[in-house]
Amino acid sequence: MQEPVPTRPRLVSVRRLPPAIAARIRQEYDAIQAEAHDLTQEQALAALRQSGAQALLVSSSFRMDAAFIAALPPEVRIAATCSVGFDHVDVAAAQARGLIVTNTPDVLTGCTADLAFALLLAAARRLPEADRVLREDRWGPRGMGDFLGVRVWGKTLGIIGMGRIGRAVARRARGFDMRVLYHDVAALPPALEEGAHHVAQLEEMLPRCDMVSLHCPLLPATRHILNRETLALLPRGAVVVNAARGGLVEEDALIAALQSGQLAAAGLDVFEGEPRFDKRLAGLPNVALAPHIGSGTVETRDAMGHRSLDNIAAVLAGRPPLDPIWS
Ligand code: DGY
């Protein structure tokens, strides 16, 4: 009698992936993987129907709204997002559909904190402008008062959202002899505070901060947490960093504060409506801009891909997922 040919699990990846992750998928799955372009929602649904896949691999830039989730073929059991944030997923719709959704916490903490700190330094020390001076061959005689940035070491940093990434930023700030305050819904146990001090009211913390870095999730309660009113509470000449989610900051108010000098500078990795962003920002010299690259290192993107595949493997083998976004 002939041995039955074991069928391999099937997977659709909507994003182009690092080589190591794409190779692991080819080894373990019958897969449809985005190659030249990322897949749209319609293309992802077509690929899922064509392949009969049980698993879907996405990232934070792929919207899994209620309509998309409702249209998923019944075979799909898990959607793994290569991100810690999951504001792109309609959680209620996923729960109602019985879809397991997993994310990738922990593995991207250090690199995202590094990027937030890089933006803080770049914005405060005017690195984008300085870089342009050399590229445009404009380095000439300069007065002692030209090109002055804002000192970072020894200043007070306010962290909004003291989860894993916020705490990792606090650790880095300690290395720069900074005082660190944080605002979150509750104070952490002292062992987790990284030497930072909890301030229960955002309105009380902001006037004490020379610099502010956002690290909270995007929720209805945190949308536009930095807005015209709260930005005005910062001392004049403060620096704002956002490497979390664009929707946390009211962009019009941020631009007005940068134009008026209320803010000396801002470092931004995220924007409302990505990949589009308000082009007025590009015209401002006191802004360091990046296209959502917080987790963008070889090591971290590989770790995120492997963790997502470990989540998928667990679920398809009938085991609990490692990182369910709800339990
Ligand atoms: C995340 O993991 O949420 C990062 O923003 C990358 O998308």
Image (spheres, grey):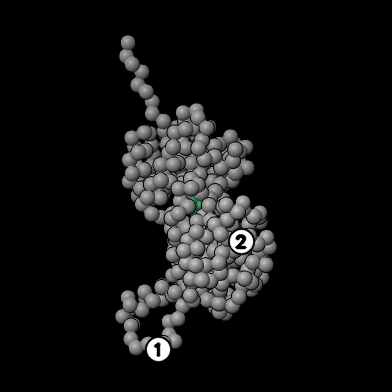
Residue 153, percent from left and from top: 48, 71
Residue 112, percent from left and from top: 46, 56
Residue annotated with mark 1: 143
Residue 168, percent from left and from top: 50, 56
Q: Nearer the viewer, residue 3 or 137?
A: 137
In this view, the residue farthest toward the top is 1
Query: What secondary structure is found at the residue carrying circle 1?
Result: loop
Q: Residue at x 63, y 57 (%)?
A: 184
Between discs 1 and 2, the one toward the N terminus = 1
In the drawing, does residue 216 fall left or right of residue 15?
A: right
Residue 198, percent from left and from top: 63, 60
Amino acid type shown at disc 2? His
Q: Residue at x 32, y 14 (%)?
A: 2
> Mark 1 Cα within 10 Å, few/some/many (few <14, many 20+)?
few
Asked if 4 appears above or below 255 in the picture, the reply is: above
Q: Residue at x 32, y 46 (%)?
A: 19
Figure disc tally: 2
Quarter of the image for the C terminus: give it.
Answer: top right
State the image quarter where residue 22 is shown: top left
Amino acid type shown at disc 1? Gly
Whole-angstrom CA distance, mark 1 to mark 2, is: 40 Å
Asked if 251 appears above or below 284 in the picture, the reply is: above
Residue annotated with mark 2: 197
Disc nearest the viewer among 1 and 2: 2
Using the rendered image of the protein, determine whether residue 24 is visible from the camera's viewpoint: yes
Q: Nearer the viewer, residue 37 or 287?
A: 287
State the image quarter where residue 24 is shown: top left
Query: What secondary structure is found at the residue carrying circle 2?
Result: strand
Q: Residue at x 31, y 80 (%)?
A: 137
Asked if 260 appears above or below 25 in the picture, the reply is: below
